Amino acid sequence: MPFAIIPEPALIQERDGFFEYTGLPVIEGDFQNEASVLKEQFAQATQTEAPHSSIFSGTDAARKIICKKDESLGAEAYTLAIGRETIELRAGCGRGAYHGLQSLRQLFLSSEKIPCACIEDEPRFGWRGFMLDASRYFYSVPFIKKLIDALSLHHINVFHWHLTDDQGWRLPVPEYPLLTEIGSKRTDRRFSGAPSRCGFYTEGDIREIVSFASVRHVEVTPEIDFPGHASAILAAYPDLGCTGGPYRVEDRFGIFDDVLCAGNDAIFDLADAVFNTLTRLFPSPYVHIGGDEVRVTRWSQCPKCNKRLAGAGLKEMPELQSWITVKLASMLAEKGKTAIGWDEVLEDSSRYTLPKEIAVMSWRGAEGGKAAVKRGHPVIMSPSTDGCYLDYRNCGDVEEPGQWGVSTARQSYSMNPVAGMSENEAALVMGGQCNLWSELIYAGKIAEYMIFPRIVAFAENMWTPQVRKDFANFAQKLTVHRQRLDMLDIAQYRGRLK
Ligand code: ACM
Ligand code: ZN
């Protein structure tokens, strides 16, 4: 295992000799922004217990990494020519350069001696995502930064930030102060009256995270879940529900009958203010608008929702879901953003043509994604049934933490986002994503244990050309890679890979 780079590069040709170094090589040439991130990461490694940790504390002036812009390379592509005294990195832009430097970072974490080689690399899919549910558990800013840094080590390039749900609203919206004042707090009913971990991210926190991610070429895509999973909104603004309440920020987990009232125009005033905040804080071209698990129990009994249904020329209550999706997506389009929705947004839209731009995140299985590409939508595959739900247990042992089911590293490695699709359909698949729902997470360390190493397997799945993928080889590389994760103080599931 001379390299054990994960994700496996598209091509590695080993050469004679070694690049040996006693500290961080001097980094010259283009891509100095990316180089300074590597310097920061290298310096952080001084605190580790690595056998060769002394090399992290200094510079080796006799060794060089020379970075060159090469416009013949694609946006995320890079090449590395590792010689005895210099490493030449070529990339078309900063994204590719960063990926190349992260592959080197892995090598540096493992050894003070790297075999000479030529490496050529670029990803199979453009969307290599990870979603963190920060509603059910409120993660600290330092934890999120550490996680984004670790994701970027594996060329994961999208951090999908699930900011709202029944159990907590985490985004400050100036026009609606109660969203955070009331909606970010829930009472933990395991105790008599004690609040559970509560809070919201300030604008400063969000800017800090977005900028930290941006220099690591990770795009932060926010999610605001409309019109279901809305208990925290309703607790703050009860007039936005069909019954008027009273409501409370939920402490139980599950799916609830109370959702935003589809007949009340005020829900779009709220959405407009939320979208303005998102547009201000998040440069991502995408906003995830949720759309999952919306019950129509209240809509069916609500005069305003019935009036809306008739006014819009619809017949069945569930059609209001797509009516709302179209409206939210067009509001976003006016602000220059593209909507993403969970695969339910496709349902009950026979009378509605959803704009083709709406991207569909397929989570209940692959079927939603397959149906979406047939209708011309871009798709991100994140099937809970096949390796993408990291809140599921790592294996069948009932003593493992996790909920609902089992999701193995082998599944994360093998899920094929374009299985069963024609070439034209497959061209609409942007890539894939793993999600961590946080109902059973009570600490960032537990989150890490659920995320690693399955996200590592998934990263190779999304990045590496199909012909270069090999689970047995991955599992062997992981024995080396686990030490790197240890050096970064990342908790990981250590059971046998299945
Ligand atoms: C989801 O897991 N409810 C998208
Ligand atoms: Zn209603």
Image (tube, rainbow, N blue to C red):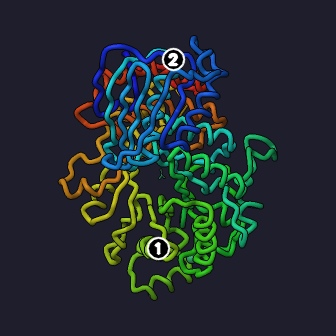
Q: Which secondary structure, mark 2?
A: loop
Place of residue 153 in the rendered image (x, y in percent of width and height, measured from the top left): 49, 34
> Left or right: 261 with respect to 474?
right
Mark number displayed over residue 314:
none
Q: Which residue is mark 1?
A: 333
Which residue corresponds to the image point at 59% horizontal and 26% vertical from the top-left?
A: 488
Q: State which quarter of the image contains the C terminus.
A: top left
* Place of residue 98 in the rendered image (x, y in percent of width and height, measured from the top left): 47, 40
Report which residue position mark 2 lands on.
Answer: 21
Q: Residue furthest bottom?
A: 311
Left or right? Give the position of 251 relative to 487.
right
Q: Amino acid at mark 1?
A: Ala
**What amino acid is labelled 2 in the image?**
Tyr
Residue extending furthest top? 51
Residue toward you, 172 or 81: 81
Label 1 CB, ligand 1: below 8 Å? no
Tell me, yes or no, if residue 486 can be seen here: no
